[in-house]
Image (spheres, rainbow, N blue to C red):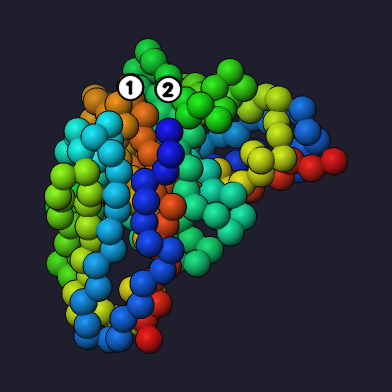
């Protein structure tokens, strides 16, 4: 099964909003309400920031939000801050108790 | 607080074996499914395997099926990954992760370990 499709990189200035897309298929993103997003700073372990497409785990800033449309999901970060510079990965349940990740998106804060 | 600490990584020759461990604390280990996820140097995340909370079933990515085996010991709160027939493409940092939903899953990973590096090279 192929990885979910994400843009390789996005960038934005402090205070702006950016959106990262994640495109799957009707066999994964389109079929289950189990898309999550992870933030990974360089050299660190990933951190869960969005689950079930739109839910924020406790302690995650409300500047992070998620949405769904058909076979795709999106992560929006509003009020961009320097500390948001990191790699972002989407992940979906893919049936048969398996998960599939996106290729990752590098966010640069200008 | 939830803690996951991996160990067992190292350098191994192609075709060799290695067993990774993940010591879990701060939650009821026997109530949550567990995952292994890997990340090759400079690459993205790849889901590897999941074991149900009670150890009754295990699931694998096609890339490791038949070579890797996940297991868990509830008396020690330890998750394992036995890796056999290792290949150069298995070189990666291996993370263990806790599934978010109790007595179910897989859903997503709400806690991750710091990772352990496995290098497959002659």
Residue at position x 71%, y 25% in the image: B85
Residue at position x 30%, y 53% in the image: A22
The percent coordinates of residue B78 (x first, y second) are: 48, 30
The percent coordinates of residue B37 (x first, y second) are: 47, 41
In the image, residue B79 sits, relative to residue B5, either above or below, namely: above
In which quadrant of the rendered view does residue A35 lie?
top left
Residue at position x 43%, y 63% in the image: A8
Dot 1 crowding, Cα within 10 Å, few <14, some 14–19, many 20+: few
Instruction: Determine the secondary structure under disc 1.
Output: loop
In which quadrant of the rendered view does residue A62 lie?
bottom left
In the image, residue A90 sits, relative to residue B58, either above or below, namely: below
Camera-side residue of A56 and A54:
A54
In this rendering, the count of numbered labels is 2
In the rendered structure, the answer to whether residue B112 lies left or right of residue B20 reads: left
Q: Residue reaching furthest right? A: B122
Check residue B14 in the rendering and tell me which mark sits there, or answer none: none
Instruction: Determine the secondary structure under disc 2.
Output: strand
**For mark 2, what is the residue?**
B59
**For mark 1, what is the residue?**
A96
Which marked residue is nearer to the observer: mark 1 or mark 2?
Answer: 1
Q: Are marks 1 and 2 in contact (CB under 8 Å)?
A: yes
Residue at position x 28%, y 58% in the image: A21
In the image, residue A80 sits, relative to residue A97, either above or below, namely: below
Camera-side residue of A2 and B11:
A2
């Amino acid at each position: 099964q192929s990885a979910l499709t994400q843009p390789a990189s996005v960038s934005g200035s402090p205070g702006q909003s950016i959106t990262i897309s994640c495109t799957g298929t009707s066999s994964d993103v389109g079929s289950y309400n189990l898309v999550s997003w992870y933030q990974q700073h360089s050299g660190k372990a990933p951190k869960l920031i969005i689950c079930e497409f739109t839910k924020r785990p406790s302690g995650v800033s409300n500047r992070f939000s998620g949405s769904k449309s058909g076979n795709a999901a999106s992560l929006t970060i509003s009020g961009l801050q320097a500390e948001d510079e990191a790699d972002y990965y989407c992940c979906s349940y893919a049936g048969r108790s398996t998960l599939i990740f996106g290729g990752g998106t590098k966010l640069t804060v200008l | 607080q939830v803690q996951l600490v991996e160990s067992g990584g190292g350098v191994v020759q192609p075709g060799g074996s290695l067993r990774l461990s993940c010591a879990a604390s701060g939650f009821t280990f026997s109530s949550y499914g567990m995952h292994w996820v890997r990340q090759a140097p400079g690459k993205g995340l790849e889901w590897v395997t999941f074991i149900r909370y009670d150890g009754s079933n295990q699931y694998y990515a096609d890339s490791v099926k038949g070579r890797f085996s996940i297991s868990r010991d509830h008396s020690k709160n330890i998750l394992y990954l036995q890796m056999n027939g290792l290949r150069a493409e298995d070189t990666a940092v291996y993370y263990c992760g806790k599934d978010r939903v109790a007595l179910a899953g897989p859903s997503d990973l709400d806690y991750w370990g710091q990772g352990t590096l496995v290098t497959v090279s002659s």
